[in-house]
Image (cartoon, grey):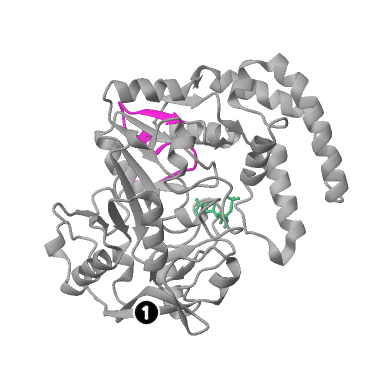
Amino acid sequence: MNTCIVGLQWGDEGKGKVVDLLSESADLVARYSGGANAGHTVLRDSREKAFALHLLPSGILRDDVLCVITNGVALDAETLLAEIDQLAARGIGLKDNLRISSRAHLVMDYHKRQDRYSEEALGADKIGTTVRGIGPCYADKVTRTTAVRLADLLDLEGLEKRLRPIVDQKNAIFAALYPGAEPIDADAILDQCRRWAERLGAMITDTTALLHRAWKDGRSMLFEGAQGTLLDLDHGTFPFVTSSNASACGFSAGSGLPARAVDRFLGVAKAYSTRVGAGPFPSEQDNHIGQYIRDKGHEYGTTTGRPRRCGWFDAVCVRYSIQIGAITEVALQHLDTLAGLDEIKVCTGYRRRGEIVDFFPAERQVLDEVECRYETLAGFSEDITQARRFEDLPANAQNYVRRLEEILETPVTMIGVGPSRDQMVYRTGA
Ligand code: IMP
């Protein structure tokens, strides 16, 4: 059984925990898009400190799982190595269980700087990126002649020849656009590349070929999406999106496998909505409700620590994401966070200038103008963090889940009731 996990909102849906749980029965776990802008927290049990992973697939916490970073990823080698070292410091060393695509693109120091300079220059109009160099790295991928791939680390002489003119070009652009920008030192960058090559060289391989072999051999594969469908470069709330295809559409191009290699596309959504950074968010609650959710759900970014914007569940968004990804089941995370609210609202549609809008709009101006049409459901006050079966949930929590299933026309097969591995309600036959 091959499964692909996809975020149905603006990222941070709790995909890491779902991947961690499903990786128990997987032979291979792969990350196929995004980069160190992503952040997964995985808590193996409530007594230990959570693991914050940005690039390593969550399967790294299990023995006997091969972890793969495929071609679609923008790889920040510095962050990856720091993550490997942090795990080793906690007794989880790599045991020949990580492979990185030679086709993946490297996030260079100058990409991160460019991300920061560009955001600073935009001022109030900034995207609110994670400043991890993601946009500039993917921009170089599209430009082609200025891109640096993992494969280049296997040919350092060739890389040196290519990198010097690239650095000259970057320096010229920075000097022209960003007064005060420090010049980039090509030698320092080359030293860094040599260090990366030394530590990562043995892991760099053709992961497309590897995945096709695994598919042919009937291995059980799990694909871990980063961010969420509404941050997808093509299908999200453009321009307030990330620079990769974070929806299910990114799976094939990002891994080299056809979509039919996946048996199920599992969507992950929170029982409410959150977003970090700027951009439209129709059901946002910039009030005591939003603050309640933020405090109770610890809604602060794993990567940047920024407070997340919080709001009600937006079924228009999630229905759209389900459609885009042909999602067949939903894992609903953080239901426990809603405990204690007298009533819970669900946005079931939009209205703009008095007219009903029944599809997720593509235009930023339209999204800025829509108003949510809400359905109000009764809340629940009980602590549900100990619930393990659907029947353990209070009636109002059950009703909320059932109503979401009706609106989304998709079964909710997993319900998160807390951060630990065991705090999950499974629903078979949903
Ligand atoms: P970038 O991916 O750093 O370029 O940021 C672009 C947008 O995507 C910003 O709004 C970020 O806050 C958002 N973003 C990127 N990665 C994540 C994530 O993993 N979770 C939530 N939002 C993200």
Nearest to the observer: residue 402 or residue 66: 402
The residue sitting at the front extreme is: 355
Task: Return the x and y of residue 168 as percentages of the image width and height.
Answer: 84, 32
Task: Return the x and y of residue 147 as percentages of the image width and height.
Answer: 68, 31
- Picture residue at 42% right of the left edge, 46% below the top: 248
- Picture residue at 48% right of the left edge, 48% below the top: 246
When asked about the image quadrant of residue 397, the answer is bottom left
Q: Is residue 88 magenta?
A: no
Task: Return the x and y of residue 199 as percentages of the image width and height.
Answer: 56, 21
Q: Secondary structure at mark 1?
A: strand
Q: Quadrant of the C terminus?
A: bottom left
Q: To which residue does mark 1 refer? A: 374
Nearest to the observer: residue 15 or residue 47: 15
Q: Is residue 5 above or below residue 214?
A: below
Q: Is residue 190 above or below residue 54?
A: above
Mark 1 packing: few (<14 Cα in 10 Å), some, or many (20+)? some
Number of marks drawn = 1
Nearest to the observer: residue 253 or residue 97: 253
Give the magenta-colored segment's residue range. Answer: 48-69
